[in-house]
C-alpha cells in the first residue's frame, strides 16, 4: 500500500465541507479497490438519511430510492446500527443472522444487487445516531489483506464521520431496538402474545428456528410452533407478508395505497440504497 499521508491530508482539509464524503471514498479506494461506496445516517427506525453514494445512474433506483421504502428495516447493517456495541468495521457475514441468505430479504431484494460482498464501518455519532460507510464489490469478496488494511483506518474513519456529521444526533428520532419488538407486538391489532412478538421480530431479521430458540431459551420446535401460530393469527403464509404487516405498523399512513403496501412488494422491487 502506498503512503496514506497524501489522501489522509486531503481528508483532513475536506472536513466540514461538502466534498468530504468524496474525499473519504477516495481514501478508502486508495487502500482497497471498491465498486461502490454509500454512506447512510441511521436514526432508530426512521428512514435512513443518505449522506453520500457513487452509484451510476443505471443502479440508482435499485440501490437508492427503493431501499428507503422499507427493505432497510431488514438490512443486517441497519440492524447492527441499533446495537452500539456493534460500532467498528465489519463484514456483512459477521453481523447477518444465521439464515440471512435464505431470508425473504435476501431472496427478493439483496441478491438483485449482484454484489459479491459488502463491508462497512459503523460509527456512532451520538444519541443513538449511527453513520454507516458501506463498501461494495461486484466481482469478488474483499481479501483478508483488504480487510486488514481497511480495519486499520477505523480511527480515521470514525473521527472524520463524527466531525462531519455531528449535527445528525441533534435531530435524531431514536426509538432503539425495542421499537422493532414493540411494532411486532402490535401486529394483528395486538393479537400476538409477547413471546410471539419476539419470535416475529427474530424471524423478520432472518434468524432460523434454532437461532430463535437459543436467543429466547426455548427449543427450535417451540419456535416453529410460535411461528405457525403467528402466521395463523395474522392470516398470512410467508415472511414477505409478515414484513408487509410489520411495515404497515411502522408506517400506518402509507398502508393501503402505496407501491410498497402489497405483501412483499417493497422487497421484490428493490436493491440497496441511499436517500
Image (tube, rainbow, N blue to C red):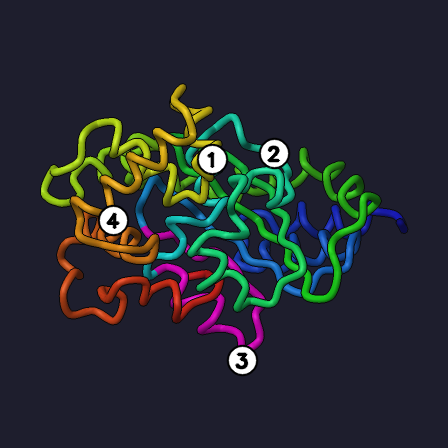
Q: Is residue 163 visible?
A: no
Q: Quadrant of residue 20?
A: bottom right
Residue 56 on the magenta segment: yes
Residue in the picture at 59% in, 52% down: 134
Mark 2 or 4 closer to N-term?
Answer: 2
Q: Secondary structure at mark 3?
A: helix
**Quadrant of the drawing holding the C terminus:** bottom left
Residue 51 on the magenta segment: yes
- On residue 246, the disc is 4
For label 3, the residue is: 58
Q: Secondary structure at mark 4?
A: helix
Pinpoint residue 199: horizontal percent, then vertical percent: 32, 34
Residue in the picture at 9% in, 43% down: 189
Label 3 crowd bin: few (<14), some (14–19), many (20+), radius 10 Å: few
Decide: is 122 above or below 115.
above
Mark 3 or 1 closer to N-term?
Answer: 3
Mark 3 or 2 closer to N-term?
Answer: 3
Left or right for 217, reference 120: left
Q: Which residues are magenta?
A: 47-68
Whole-angstrom CA distance, mark 1 to mark 4, is 28 Å
For label 1, the residue is: 125
Amino acid at each position: 500500500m502506498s503512503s496514506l499521508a497524501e489522501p489522509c491530508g486531503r481528508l483532513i482539509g475536506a472536513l466540514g465541507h461538502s466534498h468530504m464524503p468524496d474525499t473519504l471514498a477516495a481514501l478508502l479506494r486508495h487502500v482497497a479497490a471498491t465498486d461502490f461506496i454509500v454512506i447512510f445516517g441511521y436514526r432508530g427506525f426512521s428512514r435512513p438519511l443518505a449522506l453520500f453514494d457513487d452509484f451510476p445512474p443505471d443502479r440508482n433506483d435499485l440501490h437508492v430510492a427503493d431501499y428507503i421504502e422499507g427493505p432497510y428495516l431488514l438490512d443486517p447493517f441497519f440492524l447492527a446500527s441499533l446495537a452500539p456495541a456493534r460500532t467498528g468495521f465489519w463484514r456483512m457475514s459477521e453481523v447477518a443472522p444465521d439464515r440471512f441468505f435464505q431470508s425473504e430479504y435476501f431472496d427478493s431484494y439483496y441478491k438483485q444487487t449482484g454484489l459479491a460482498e459488502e463491508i462497512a464501518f459503523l460509527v456512532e455519532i451520538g444519541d443513538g445516531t449511527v453513520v454507516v460507510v458501506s463498501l461494495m464489490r461486484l466481482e469478488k469478496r474483499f481479501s483478508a489483506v483488504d480487510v486488514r488494511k481497511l480495519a486499520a483506518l477505523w480511527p480515521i474513519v470514525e473521527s472524520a464521520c463524527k466531525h462531519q456529521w455531528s449535527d445528525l444526533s441533534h435531530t435524531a428520532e431514536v426509538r432503539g431496538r425495542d421499537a422493532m419488538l414493540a411494532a411486532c407486538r402490535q401486529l394483528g391489532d395486538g393479537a400476538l402474545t409477547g413471546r410471539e412478538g419476539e419470535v416475529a421480530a427474530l424471524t423478520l431479521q432472518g434468524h432460523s428456528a434454532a437461532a430463535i430458540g437459543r436467543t429466547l431459551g426455548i427449543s427450535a420446535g417451540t419456535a416453529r410452533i410460535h411461528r405457525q401460530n403467528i402466521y395463523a393469527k395474522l392470516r398470512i403464509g410467508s415472511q414477505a407478508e409478515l414484513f408487509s404487516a410489520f411495515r404497515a405498523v411502522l408506517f400506518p399512513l402509507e398502508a393501503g395505497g402505496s407501491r410498497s403496501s402489497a405483501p412483499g412488494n417493497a422487497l421484490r422491487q428493490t436493491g440497496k440504497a441511499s436517500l
